[in-house]
Image: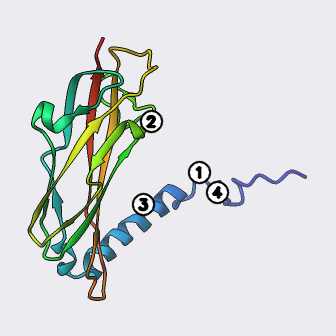
């Protein structure tokens, strides 16, 4: 004897009034609401800004250092918007496919990028600077190609004073084209 679930009032998981997508949407909204109500406003006292966010450089020679600051006048400049001392760590990263722009390829090796200094200590409301040098090693046969690297600048609060700490971070884009 065959039993027809539809006749007995059983529903399939797709027909249910409460599916997984709905559950996760409600859960995500609940977490967002809890975040806004549970954390004090003083958490937002940290912040970081820069004008170095999407920089393009042309005519980079293979095998020779290219000082972005000296050649273009653009350098990594940071302003601590917070009321605490901020230790900033700066690092070159290979971009994800979603981060790539205008026919650029991901940098084959982030070690082509030298950031000096790679760590800064910014006083409250203070500023700091770092220079970037691009050096593509000899033997690269991909002349006239455009590469992209992401510059990740992340802060770490030095004095936590207990409580919740939120560390500011920035992700800047640097694209460079090799000399033909």
Q: Position of residue 57 (x, y in %)?
A: 21, 27
Query: Mark 4 vs mark 3: which is more N-terminal?
Result: 4
Q: Is residue 15 above or below residue 61?
A: below
Q: Which residue is mark 3?
A: 25
Q: Quadrant of residue 155?
A: bottom left
Q: Which residue is mark 4?
A: 11
Q: Find residue 109 and name its label.
A: 2
Do tag 1 and tag 4 residues touch (Cβ < 8 Å)?
Answer: no
- Marks 1 and 2, how far apart at CA: 47 Å
Residue at 86%, 51% in the rendered image: 2
Q: Find residue 14 and name its label.
A: 1
Residue at 30%, 11% in the rendered image: 180
- Marks 2 and 3, how far apart at CA: 39 Å
Which secondary structure lies at badge 2?
loop
Q: Position of residue 166 (x, y in %)?
A: 29, 72
Q: Residue furthest top?
A: 180
């Amino acid at each position: 004897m065959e039993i027809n679930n539809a006749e007995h009032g059983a529903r399939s998981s797709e027909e249910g009034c409460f599916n997984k997508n709905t559950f996760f949407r409600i859960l995500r909204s609940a977490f967002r609401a809890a975040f806004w109500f549970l954390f004090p406003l003083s958490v937002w006292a940290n912040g970081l800004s820069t004008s170095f966010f999407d920089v393009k450089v042309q005519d980079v020679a293979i095998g020779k250092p290219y000082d972005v600051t000296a050649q273009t006048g653009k350098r990594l400049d940071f302003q601590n918007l917070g009321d605490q001392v901020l230790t900033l760590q700066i690092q070159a990263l290979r971009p994800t496919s979603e981060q790539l722009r205008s026919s650029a390829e991901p940098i084959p090796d982030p070690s082509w990028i030298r950031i000096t200094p790679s760590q800064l200590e910014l006083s409250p409301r203070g500023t700091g600077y770092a220079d970037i040098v691009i050096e593509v090693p000899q033997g690269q046969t991909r002349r006239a190609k455009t590469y992209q690297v992401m510059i990740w600048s992340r802060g770490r609060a030095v004095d936590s004073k207990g409580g919740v700490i939120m560390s500011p971070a920035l992700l800047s884009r640097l694209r460079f084209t090799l000399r033909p």
